[in-house]
Amino acid sequence: MTNTPATTPHETTDDTRKDRFFTLPVSILIFASFMLGLSEFVVVGILPDIAEGLKVSEVTVDNLVAIFAFVYAPCTPLGSALTARFPRFRTYLTLMGVFLAGNILCAFAPNYPVLLVARLLIASVSGTLVAIAMTFAPDVTTDKYRTKFIAWVFSGFSIASVAGVPIGTSVANAFGWRWTFHMINVLTVILLIAMFLVLPRNSHIIKVGFLSQFRLFFDRRIHLGVLAVVFGAAASYVFYTYLTPIMRDEIHLPEQYVSLGLVVYGVACLCSNLTAGKLAEHGRGVEPLYHLRWVFLVHAVLLASLALAHWIPLYGAVLLVALGLLMYQFNASSQVLYMDVAAQSHPGSMNLASSLNSMSFNIGIAIGSAVGGLANDFLGLTWLGPVGAIFALLAMATAMLMRPYVGQHPER
């Protein structure tokens, strides 16, 4: 008989902790993405209150949304490349401090120009904070949960959209729009204290020049990954920008149920983010995104059939839920591509690689929204889905071009 060494209670506890996904550090990083999403999206819910409070038009306040995305996209890769040269823990907390300062300025803004400056301040650091959060993955969870971690960090934004924004809007309705930002500020202070106590302080600094990191952009795999995300995001945002009028005018959903319809769509998007993590587990490098070429095809077919919602409202209602389930399916797979390619060929560009998904997605949002506006003006709501299907087919074609790179596995 072979004697098996006894396992001490301490060892058993450590093993159990390592096998658990929702550890305190992981939960804190997910909550951080929730706070970033809440601060970004809540303006949409309290837009009329801000306009009335600052005595400006709703159109003027609405510009904050477009300006936020315009600043967010370029600042994300630039900020990520710049911060890679500094200790990660201190940099992350410093940028969270800037995020807090921006929201405090929002809460006390005496006029629109000050509010605009505050939103620009928040936009300039938000994408970089997401990118740095991704680099914590090897230190707060095991390789087994890597894609799940990526999916949940992105899901923080969906949770903010589904649950956080309605809560923020309710606070604004009850106490005034400034109290929504006061709520964000209190939660951010609590989050900062938790980060200081729990997040690992080790850094993975690789001494590389600022410009040298951008060699990553010369890698064809990165080109294809960025294009796939741009086209995938644009496909959804052609119609998503007009989701409320589509529900009201195409599906004929009664006005009092539109808010409920938006919540149902938001829940579908959250599920999309979480299932994206499962899909990203199938391979390394470009493989997960390459495998999604058929998902892009299904997305294109469903988008094209959205035109039928005008004549078959019930089909349109079911179809919108299906489109919500497909909206973020590529998020985790594209993040795996960026980070694996960087780890294999450009190890000094990990922070930059972590930022590419946010950058690409925001470019896709801008393109999709602009094309959706033109399509709505010239063709009408009925044809937004078919126009979006063109982008989904382009995403599929881009994914198919990844075939020569399948099997080029980065080292673990």
Image (tube, rainbow, N blue to C red):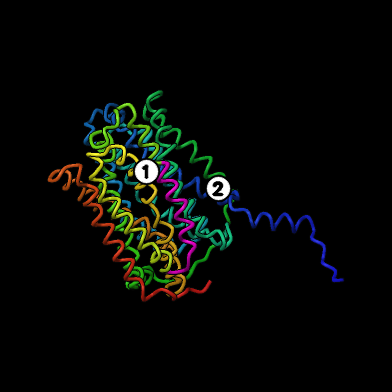
Residue 399 lies, in percent from the top left, at: 33, 66
Quarter occupied by the N terminus: bottom right
Circle 2 residue = 27
As shown in the figure, which amino acid type bears the numbered disc 1?
Val
Between label 1 and label 2, give the one nearer the viewer. Answer: 1
What residue span does the magenta drawing correspond to?
A: 267-285
Q: Is residue 282 magenta?
A: yes
Residue 207 visible in rendering: no
Between 379 and 43, which is closer to the camera in this rendering? 379
Residue 141 lies, in percent from the top left, at: 58, 58
Q: Which residue is painted at 25% across and 57% down in the image?
A: 391
Eyeballing the image, is 52 above or below 59? above
Q: Which residue is painted at 20% across and 43% down in the image?
A: 382
Residue 105 lies, in percent from the top left, at: 37, 38
In the image, taking residue 91 as reference, residue 125 lies left or right, namely left
Circle 1 residue = 321
